[in-house]
Image: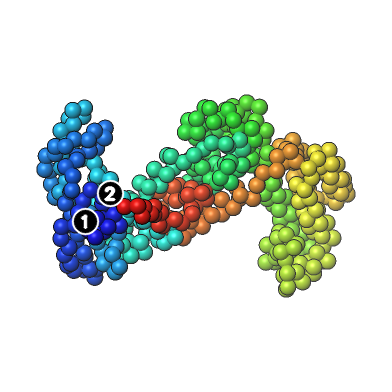
Amino acid sequence: MNDYFTRLLGIQGFVIEAITQERQRQYSRVIVSIKRVKEEFVCSECGHVSDKGIEYRSREIQHLSCWQHLSYLRFKQYRVDCPHCGLKVEALPFIQRYSRVSTMLGNLVYELCKVMTNKAVGIFQGLDDSTIKAIDKEKLQEKQANRPLDGISALGVDEIFIGGKQCLHLISDLNGPRGPELIYIGDGHKEKDLKKFWKWFGRERTKLIKVAVMDMWRGFFNSFKANCPGIVIVFDKFHVIQHLLDALNKVRQQELGRIGEKLKGLLTGKKFVLLSRLAHVRGNARKDLNELLGASPRLRKAHLLKESFGHLWSYTSKTWARKFWQLWKDSLKWTRLKSYERFVKMVDKHLDGILAYCDHKLPLGFIEGTNLKAKNIIRRAYGYRDDEYMKLKIIQACSSLRFFQPWIVTFNNSE
């Protein structure tokens, strides 16, 4: 029976010597005193096993909770006179070298932090907030350092601004075997700022990158062209459309200034109704939009062009996509929409990168969704004091690391 409980506790090689209970603040503590069965001592540096140990100290670490009680393991730890490394503290399978919690509890805390706030996990497990953060951060660093990066041939890069000052670039794997996922976050958005990523990613993996999705920022373009010769650049659909929405908003502002008295009640406060996709505008908002477009022919023409422009990404042939683009430009004749004319010049300049999507149908929405999720994570936490921890939490939420797996148990009924 004693051996069965030690296997359940994950402390093979030890037996339970005594169990005591005491109170600590609002928690009940159960202290399990254990002693070793075999005189085997493992060097923490090289793994050498010795049959002799030097008694070092008594330790007490927190283990997984037992029902509503916090449980602790109390045991003696030894030093090993290793022939290779000298005098070292022994390694034990259920605890890290300097940790005050067991490996199993550390794994549980890491998993709970995926679905709960650090403060809630601390209350649940009777641990301090700083301890929860230290455990979670250490596990995240370990996962990020050891995560697989094989099979990646397409990357996506974008930037977000935090607080209007700090800029981060987010790099995602768009076609790997684990599906689209965020793999790296770095500071800045200049060409030199991406050097750390290329060093982290590795030269051999970089050679395998064939396609990159990005906005039209020159720093990203130059960095990928310099490190991945022959790469195909695909310009992100959502950034191109954002330029079109800016052009449409300028038309709205011009109309408000030109015939403001007539449209004063219609144009004011209708910006987001006008810029939203028509399929998403319903009810009273749809009624307001129809009234607004009926009052201004120039605004109606600009809105129709905005709605039709999205069809450019539905083509699989560059030839037909170019024909569509030419027809769209022809529709601008005699409209006197100056902001749209500037938009056309911008698209013509980057047309090859936009039409590259015809040959590489990558999940463009994932990049934009990652940006929104990153901002939401920062907002929910009311900001982070630790930038590295913030980056790791964003990567976790936007990658395969996000899946909640609290209990991973291997059953062995043969014993």
Q: Nearer the viewer, residue 306 or 402?
A: 402
In-image side of 339 versus 115 (left or right): right
Q: Which residue is mark 2?
A: 94
Q: Quadrant of residue 362?
A: top right
Q: Nearer the viewer, residue 240 or 31?
A: 31
**Mark 2 packing: few (<14 Cα in 10 Å), some, or many (20+)?**
some
Q: Position of residue 183 (x, y in %)?
A: 51, 42
Q: Which mark is residue 204?
A: none
Q: Position of residue 333 (x, y in %)?
A: 87, 47
Q: Quadrant of residue 212?
A: top right
Residue 224 seen:
yes
- Disc 1 residue type? Leu
How far apart are labels 1 and 2 at the CA level? 10 Å
Image quadrant where one finds the N terminus? bottom left
Q: Residue at x 64, y 32 (%)?
A: 210
In-image side of 252 versus 29 (left or right): right
The secondary structure type at the circle numbered 2 is loop
Q: How is the image coloured?
A: rainbow
Q: Judge whether 110 appears above or below 123 on screen.
A: above
Q: Which mark is residue 73?
A: 1
Q: Judge whether 192 appears above or below 11 on screen.
A: above
- Disc 2 residue type? Phe
Q: Residue at x 56, y 50 (%)?
A: 370
